[in-house]
Image (cartoon, rainbow, N blue to C red):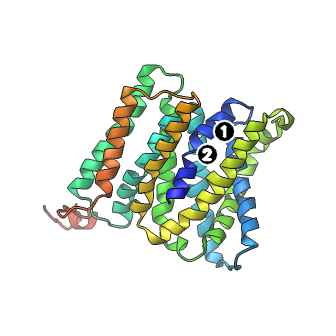
Amino acid sequence: MLVANFAWGFLSPLSKAVLLNSDVSPLALTTFRITGGAITFWIASLFVKRESVERRDMLMLALASIFAIVFNQVSFIKGVSLTSPIDASIITTTLPIITMIVSAFYLKEAITWKKIVGITFGASGALLLIVSGHHSGSRSSSVWGDLLCLLAQFSFTIYLVWFKGLIGKYSPVTLMKWMFTFASLFCLPLSFNQLTTINYSLLPTPVYFDIAFIVLAGTFLGYLLIPIGQRNLRPTEVSMYNYLQPVVASVLSLIWGMDTFGVMKGIAVALVFSGVYIVTQNISFQFSFPSFKKIKEGYRI
């Protein structure tokens, strides 16, 4: 999880660099990433033991690819095109909080007062980031871009929580080979026109290197390691490693002159990180909210 999220930390600034320095559109870049992932995982499958996937699981893998890859990557890269790399990477740290909320409803994990405080801190930080970017008039920040990056985190949360059982049945290579294949089938028809209008001969050489890194490290390596972490860690613990991404992205963005780091962003980072820390720490006292079933039965606190 540490290596995967370190590689993902490069995605925001590198994606922004590709979009700023070429005529590659966000959807086209997403398609490069998804189809590149499918090709690399099919090549990797030639060097590992072949696994047969049950027919009923194929449908589940197709559904998982929509949340983990299509919605997640399209929303994120489109969001990055509208907002700053630092904003996008900070918003990725809300994943543990969103995961905790979804897990509470789907996996029936208890919601404690400690987690409520963590949610409040994290949500306040994300909201401050979005609102401050809007009112500051910064050309690098955008409310819609920030919200799209937030939608990407929610989409990936659904994958982490709802498909945990499916993830344990197959090897990471088998899982990702089929998920990226299905994702490619979804994306290619939508982006075909944009892919054919790119003048590939005029693309700067650094853009090709950036796309190669996005595909090989940010996609193949990251998605290869994620299922391993999912098998050994709880969904909330898996998502906790996301707070490495803004550290990497912020350093690169500042070095490359893509963004600035002001007081408001500093406060937002402190709130989000504090919320993540509170949510992912264990303490002795807990308070669990009653289930909807108990409420119906007249359960009272």
Per the image, the residue denoted by label 2 is 74
- Across and down, in percent, residue 194 comes to 76, 39
Pointer 2: residues within 10 angstroms few (<14), some, or many (20+)? Answer: many
Left or right: 120 with respect to 17?
left
Q: Do the residues labelled 1 and 2 touch (CB within 8 Å)?
A: yes
**Residue that extends furthest to the top in the rendered view of this protein:** 137
- Across and down, in percent, residue 4 comes to 55, 56
- Give the amino acid at mark 1: Pro
Per the image, the residue denoted by label 1 is 26
Label ID, residue 290 = none
Between 296 and 149, which is closer to the camera in this rendering? 149
Between 138 and 204, which is closer to the camera in this rendering? 204
Ranked by sequence position, the earlier of labels 1 and 2 is 1
Name above or below for residue 280 compared with residue 165: above
Left or right: 112 with respect to 47?
left
Pointer 1: residues within 10 angstroms few (<14), some, or many (20+)? Answer: many
The residue shown at (54%, 66%) is: 227
Name above or below for residue 60 compared with residue 252: below
The residue shown at (33%, 39%) is: 270
- Across and down, in percent, residue 16 comes to 62, 35
Between 245 and 74, which is closer to the camera in this rendering? 245
Circle 2 SS class: helix
Between 215 and 95, which is closer to the camera in this rendering? 215
